[in-house]
Amino acid sequence: MDIYGELEERGLIAQVTDKEEIRQLINGGGARFYIGFDPTADSLHVGHFMALCLMKRLQMAGNKPVVLLGGGTGYIGDPSGRTDMRAMLTPETIQHNCECFKRQMSRFIQFGDDKAIIVNNADWLLKLNYIDLLREVGACFSVNNMLRAECYKQRMEKGLSFLEFNYMIMQSYDFWHLNEKYGCNMQFGGDDQWSNMLAGTELIRKKTGKDAYAMTITLLLNSEGKKMGKTAKGAVWLDENKTSPYDFYQYWRNIDDVDVMKCIKMLTFIPMEEIREMEKWAPERINEKKELLAFELTKLVHGEEKAQKAQAEARAAFGGGGEMPEKQVSVDNPTIIPVLVAAGICASNGEARRLIQQGGVSLNDSKVTDFNAAVNDGDILHKGKKVHIKIRFA
């Protein structure tokens, strides 16, 4: 089975250090790989979802996952993809978040003897002696090379703290430690982690003379080039108390048409033979694809029963197959009140004001409180829980 070839066909692989060696390890079930998760919140989100799905795919092919919880690196905060410094978390918060992650990960990964293991880098990073670290690890790093890394370059203009500057060293130390103690020979991560991961492979080679490998996952972007999983409220969470199964379903049901097949390939476990046939479907069947995507991903995260319930609720709310109704309106002032009236959601400006005051109007995912809130083409207006209309301007 060419699992590596399937990862390529699904568009999951961004960069690799040693393609043929990695292909042989993965296809032969010889990868003892790790992915790190810093506990910056009390729930995993859609940004972690792709990594979890990749771990699941590789475990199904006989490879051994090592889930690394960043109980230690969480004290520092990864500067990758950031324009400012992350908030400092208390030890109690970090520990709580780690426990939440463990519960959610068990839905995707099989833990136990000769299966997957879960470790916390607080167990070794918090015990490090600073002088020993400088001598043992710091001597292997070139500051000039570190400053050329993309994760640092994008922060230099606004200021990069020495605290964050150490993150690459900590992540590299993790890989070395996991290699020495657990035989971990490969690291996976988001494409924005490439510099940190290369540093880890080089540290292992310098300290042990052994080969270690790295592969980054293609970041899941929407058609506008922004990270998927973000809404007006923030992240799309895997915890149903933060993002309900219905809202999770609706998030995927309403993604842009051009992103649907990409998400089906990268995130679902539908066999590639079926996906290739699906790519031949007529354009008019786009909503079938969206429903399939939303159902499959909701089933993965919340179970089949809740996925079926979310799908039924969506179909009932939107009529028929769950397609979001669109309304073309023409207004001189594209703000919430005139748009509510022009779309036929409210009969008058006065009714629109009262509905907003009562908390009955939402724009996309946010409750409307401002009578002058701007409405953009493609925005979704909600009246209560039963009326949902996508606005199109004439």
Image (cartoon, rainbow, N blue to C red):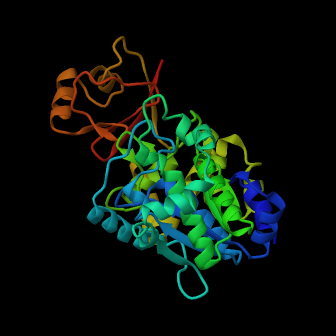
Image position, residue 214 (x, y; %): 68, 59
Which residue ends up furthest to the bottom in the rendered image? 113
| Left or right: residue 230 compared with residue 293 | left
Foreground residue among 219 and 178: 178
User: Does 334 sit above or below residue 307?
Assistant: above
The location of residue 275, given as percent across then percent down, is: 73, 57
Q: Identify the residue at horizontal 46%, vertical 50% (top origin).
A: 78
Residue 255 lies, with reference to residue 50, above or below; the image says above
Residue 337: give x, y in percent of width and height: 26, 23
Report whether 309 appears left or right of 345. Answer: right
Query: Residue 310: horizontal and vertical position, in percent?
Result: 42, 60
**Residue 312 visible within the image:** no
Q: In this view, does 248 lie above or below 178?
A: above
| Residue nearest the observer in this picture, 298 or 287 | 298
Is residue 67 visible to us here? yes
Q: In which quarter of the image is residue 207?
A: bottom right
- In the rendered image, the residue lying farthest to the top is 332
